[in-house]
Each structure stands twice: as C-alpha cells, then as structure tokens.
C-alpha cells in the first residue's frame, strides 16, 4: 500500500519543475513529516522556517522545509531501490 507521500511525490516534483524552484506548503510538509516518521525519523517544526530533523540513526540537524522534503524523497527512493515501495501509477 502506498503512503500519502508516495502518491504525492510525482505531483510535487512536477510542480517544482513547472515553477523552476522547490516550494513547500504546510500541507506538503505534513505529508512528508508523516512519511518520515513512518520510516523512523523524527520531524518537528521550529519557530520560524526551520525544521528539526532527526534521522534513523539519531543524527539531528536544523533544516529548511525544502531540505526536509528532499530528505523524504531520498528515503522514498531508498525504499524503491530495496523493493519495499512502489511508484504511483
């Protein structure tokens, strides 16, 4: 079964390509946060524009929403490579 993020990934990438830049809405971030938490990460929005991101190994850093979403894309690709997820059709 596909996650909401997996289903939204193509739409997000197409929007970024059409706009010529990566932009992340609060709804996009919620979908990405849910996915990242499913794969073992901890994501918390900080006051302002930064996200506190803790990966599966306990490494913590403060990143932008855009970076957090790209980190979610990287984990989705890793799942696809390992055969644990499917691309949306």
Image (spheres, rainbow, N blue to C red):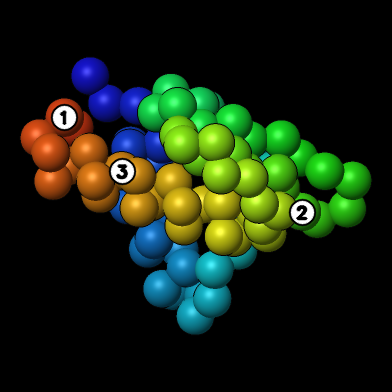
The answer to whether residue 31 is visible is no
- Badge 3 or badge 1: first in the primary sequence: 3
Q: Residues within 10 Å of mark 2 (few under 14, many from 20)?
A: some
Up the image or down, 73 lies above or below 82; here it is: below
In this view, the residue farthest toward the bottom is: 20
Instruction: Give the spatial CA distance, label 2 vs label 3.
Output: 22 Å
| Residue 47 image point, x, y percent | 89, 46
Check disc 2 and report the residue beneath it.
50
Q: Position of residue 30 (x, y in %)?
A: 61, 34
Q: Secondary structure at mark 3?
A: helix
In the rendered structure, are the residues bearing label 2 and label 1 in contact, judged by CB atoms less than 8 Å apart?
Answer: no
Residue occupying image coordinates x 33% and y 37%: 7
What's the residue at 54%, 76% (across, down)? 21
Q: Which mark is residue 84?
A: 1
User: Residue 76 bears which disc, if any?
Assistant: 3
Q: Residues within 10 Å of mark 1 (few under 14, many from 20)?
A: few
């Amino acid at each position: 079964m596909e996650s909401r993020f997996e289903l939204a990934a193509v739409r997000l990438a197409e929007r970024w390509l059409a706009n010529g830049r990566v932009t992340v809405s609060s709804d996009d971030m919620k979908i990405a946060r849910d996915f990242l938490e499913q794969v073992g990460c901890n994501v918390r929005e900080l006051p302002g524009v930064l996200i506190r991101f803790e990966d599966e190994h306990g490494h913590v850093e403060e990143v932008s929403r855009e970076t957090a979403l790209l980190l979610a894309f990287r984990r989705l690709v890793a799942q696809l490579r390992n055969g644990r997820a499917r691309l949306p059709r």
